[in-house]
Amino acid sequence: MVEGGEDWTRSWASLGLAFRGAFHPGPEDGAPVFADGAPMRTIVLLGWTGGDQWPLFAVSPEAGDGLPDPLNRWSKRLIDGTAIELGAAALYPFGGPPWLDFQSWALKAEPVHRSPLGLLIHPEWGLWHSYRGALGFRQRLELPARISEPHPCDHCVGRPCLSACPVSAFAEGRPYDYLACRGHLEGAGEDCRSHACAARRACPVAADKHYSEPQATFHIRALLGSRLG
């Protein structure tokens, strides 16, 4: 764990964020620099795991004020505040361009792998997790050795995630068909709108961690409100 990591983890959990690993960035990672030009020597990822954090967000001011992007605004409020406390820089997977490569960062920070859907799959949380932001530090903090886990998809029989989508938005070796997915969600896709993406639900890894109906509905509404680009 990073220095003071146990205290940090408890503090973040009380806010509604989970520690999602950390790494020392290299030139290939595209980490921004501080305003004075100093490099970031450690990046700590923060996010959500299953439905653990949903209850705290659901009662937040952002969730109930009716304004756009409530989850992004909630994440920014919490992580900006934490960054100020710790003398770090707040980093986000939204708000670009430029866009920060959180997926590549996550592959260095914790034992996740790319799934056939393009989403990162975690050995404990399956496809039911996300990254809400990160903290960049000037210091090279001491980190534990990265735990390696086998790719859970390598031994998955039939890869049901690829065949479960009603409009075949996912296929091996082909980019995610956003337009087909969105068209289905805006039309006959009540099952996906209410219970989360059928392709994600078909994955047998961490099937017990899938989102509740309120959380699933929230994320689908956010997707429908997003723009392709």
Image (cartoon, helix red, strand yellow):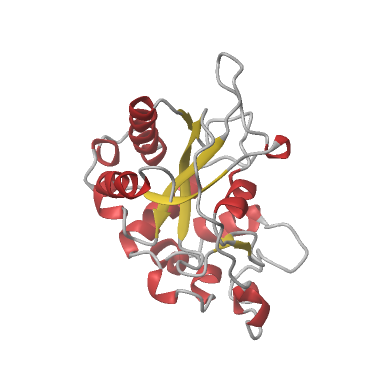
Picture layout, residue 55 above or below residue 12: below
Picture layout, residue 154 above or below residue 45: below
In the rendering, at what x and y percent does residue 145 appear? 55, 57
In the rendering, at what x and y percent does residue 127 appear? 51, 65
Q: Is residue 55 left or right of residue 199?
A: left
Marks counted in the figure total 0
In the rendering, at what x and y percent does residue 80 appear? 38, 29
| Foreground pick, 22 / 205 | 22
Q: Residue at x 34, y 37 (%)?
A: 74
Which quadrant of the rendered structure holds the C terminus? top right
| Foreground pick, 64 / 188 | 64
Residue farthest to the right, as pictured: 173
| Foreground pick, 53 / 217 | 53
Picture layout, residue 18 above or below residue 90: below
Q: Residue at x 63, y 75 (%)?
A: 153
In the rendering, at what x and y percent does residue 49 appear? 40, 58
Q: Residue at x 62, y 54 (%)?
A: 107
Picture layout, residue 12 above or below residue 158: above
Residue farthest to the bottom, as pictured: 157
Within the image, what quadrant is residue 73 found in?
A: top left
